[in-house]
Amino acid sequence: MPTRVASLVLLGALLPLAARAELDCGRMMRTVTRFDGTVRTIEPIRRRGAQVIQVDYEKLRYLVSVDVGAVEGVNPALSTGDTCLFGVHDPSRTFGANSVGRTLRLEAEWMECDGVFRRILGLRTVPARRVVEDTDSFLEVGHTYRAQALWEDGDLSITSHLWIPHHHALGFQWEDVPETLRDGTVHPIVFEVLAVRIDQVEEWQWVTLYEVRLVEGEDHRP
């Protein structure tokens, strides 16, 4: 059965997506910003009083200074000319080996709460080639997935299995759906998650709405 906003789903595990829905945030939006970042220094985390942006949920061990270059789009999280001090567990995992002095294409996930920017949540290097994942877990902002989808009742719904956070209704807002996918049959698709909005509708009940875009790929042939 397709996953739709209209039905409140009370099944599934309590996933990291739900864990990031903060109790003082009635409407949370998570999205990504891609930018060029030049790694200047990497040092053990000894500095006191520094304004550190934590981008790992494991124990922080290193501080990485990054000069922000060209930023994609307008956002409240990053601006060209900024110098950011990121706290990470393993610099090679986040930035790759021998990254000092290199300019990398990076992707920062950030959050706003009730329309106000709150913080950067995560950081990763943008893969040179698009990586397409299966929809066998929760969906992450900035990632690309393959799935089966069906046009029904004027909307495109995912028919592939999705893990749904506990007490969350789940829906999708498609940027564009070509006519070839609107014939009422199941089609393989590839889509990118651009953003996710989580609205608390009442105590312990949320609506999670993914903003997504269809992309070309082996599994999407409109």
Image (cartoon, rainbow, N blue to C red):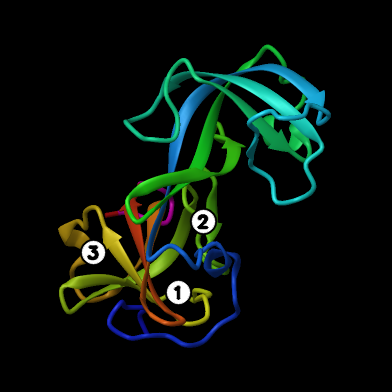
The kind of secondary structure element at disc 3 is helix
x, y (%) of residue 165? 52, 75
Residue 82 in magenta stretch: no
Q: Which residues are magenta?
A: 216-221
Tell me the residue at 58%/67% (across/down): 19
* Neighbourhood count class around disc 2 (C-alpha, 10 Å): few under 14, some 14–19, many 20 upward: some
Name the N-terminal-most of marks 1 and 2. 2
* Callout 3 amino acid: Leu
* Callout 1 amino acid: Ser
Q: Which residue is mark 3?
A: 181
Tell me the residue at 54%/46% (across/down): 131
The kind of secondary structure element at disc 1 is loop
x, y (%) of residue 130? 50, 41
Q: Which residue is mark 2?
A: 140
Of residues 175 and 177, the one drawn nearer to the viewer in this rendering: 175
Q: Residue furthest top?
A: 101
Tell me the residue at 26%/54% (across/down): 222
